[in-house]
Image: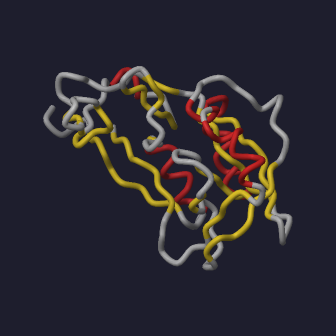
Amino acid sequence: MKIWQLKSSTDDYETFQLLNYEEDKKYFKTSFHSTVSFSDSWTPKFIEVTDEGKSSDYPIFWGKSGVQIISEKAKNVLEPIVGDNIEFLPLIHKQTHKKYYAMHVLKVLEALDTNKTIFDKLSSGLTIGCKKFVFISYVVQDEPVFKLNINGKVHPNYLLVSAQFKNAILESELKGFEFTEVWDSEEGA
């Protein structure tokens, strides 16, 4: 079993930001680092291009750290795979009126083998990330997508995915997705 970290490609793709940043930033400040659904209270937010480039199904979003956005095409591919693990919150491109979606990952796991994972720490001792991931296999084995709980909080910068998720993206020819393998259960077994 393998786990990948998902990131947006920076290879000449367009990037986005909130059109009404001051008004809408409150929705992005902490809500996306919670497992509490807020789709019932969400209203579509407008976004605009900040850097011109090729069209991407997974563009970089400068709204808030840890918030990923996807195209409607990507949502249609991923929705059957991720089920209730993600809620897709509508965003609207101000010029083209194309729909994008902010992905609010609701599945957060205590999945790291803390005895074998090598953590990235500040001089104060505060854990800020991982240098080497070692997962508890039975915790992640049936999870297509998840975030990690580190220090009792949802870590905003790790969106982790399974082979099923990765393969669905690759087979659909969606653009702008990058996968970095962070763990292979066969290594060190």
Image coords of residue 107 (percent x, y): 55, 27
Could you tell me which quadrant the N terminus lies in? top left
- The image shows residue 176, relative to residue 119, as above or below, that is below
Q: Quadrant of residue 136?
A: top left
Image coords of residue 123 (percent x, y): 19, 36
- The image shows residue 25, relative to residue 94, as above or below, that is above
Image coords of residue 39 (percent x, y): 77, 32
| Residue drawn at point x = 36 percent, y = 54 percent | 180
Name the residue at the left extreme: 188
| Residue drawn at point x = 49 percent, y = 52 percent | 167
Image coords of residue 154 (percent x, y): 48, 29
| Residue drawn at point x = 65 percent, y = 23 percent | 36
In this view of the protein, which residue sits in the foreground, 127 or 77?
127
> What is the basis of the colouring in this image?
secondary structure
| Residue drawn at point x = 66 percent, y = 29 percent | 84
Q: Quadrant of residue 132?
A: top left
Q: Is residue 165 left or right of residue 122?
A: right
Q: Is residue 93 left or right of residue 155?
A: right
Count numbered badges in the picture: 0
In this view of the protein, which residue sits in the foreground, 170 or 134?
134
Could you tell me which quadrant the C terminus lies in? top left
Q: Quadrant of residue 169?
A: bottom right
Q: Is residue 115 left or right of residue 112?
A: left
